[in-house]
Image (cartoon, rainbow, N blue to C red):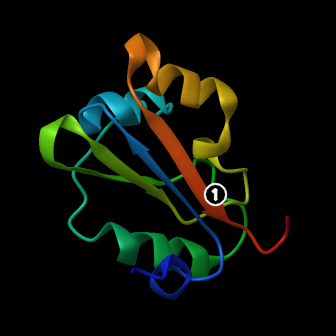
Amino acid sequence: MVDLSELFGEGWCVTLTQLACVQALERMGVRDVTHVDDGVQLATERLEAGGMQPEVLLLGRGLRDGWSLIVELEGTLGWVGRDRAVLEALSVGGRVAASVFEDPTS
């Protein structure tokens, strides 16, 4: 079993969806889906810089059989994966979408 709090720290949201990664990220509001060599390092740098970021960083990875895993590590603007409208957009057409999160402030 994986301890996500040990892996990601004290605040995170993980979304699993039955969509290709680019499609999932677009439905989650990402305007410019771009490859990032080390997304976790980028997220860490953004968190260490403090302050409010102008946009949420979503890190996605395609899985087998058309599934995707999306990770958010910055909850200062809210967790995108918790938004009801986002989950509805990810599950259109009978697809499955689910999110889990850990937020020490809620």
- Left-right relation of 70 to 64: right
Side of 40 relative to 103 (left or right): left
Q: Position of residue 3 (x, y in %)?
A: 48, 82
In this view, the residue farthest toward the front is 1
Quarter of image, res 53: bottom right
Q: Please state which of residues 18 and 105 is positioned toward the viewer in this rendering.
A: 18
**Badge 1: few (under 14), some or many (20 or more) residues near its Cα, within 10 Å?**
few
Residue at 63%, 49% in the rendered image = 54
Task: Give the residue type at disc 1.
Answer: Gln
Q: Regarding mark 1 in the picture, which secondary structure is present there? A: loop
- Please determine whether, in this image, residue 16 is positioned above or below residue 4: above
Direction right: furthest residue? 106
Q: Check the picture and name the quadrant holding the C terminus.
A: bottom right
Residue wearing tag 1: 53
Residue sitting at x 61%, y 43%: 80
Quarter-of-image position of residue 9: bottom right
Q: Percent position (x, y) of residue 66?
A: 19, 35
Q: Residue at x 37, y 78 (%)?
A: 41
Image quadrant in which you'd find residue 81: top right
State the residue in front, 46 or 68. Answer: 68
Viewed as shown, does residue 75 lie left or right of 91?
right
Q: Is residue 69 above or below residue 10?
A: above
Vertical comparison of 20 with 6: above or below: above
Q: Position of residue 25 (x, y in %)?
A: 38, 36
The residue lying furthest to the left in this view is 64
Horizontally, residue 39 falls left or right of residue 106, namely: left
- Residue located 31% across and 38% down the image: 33
The quadrant of the rendering that contains the N terminus is bottom left
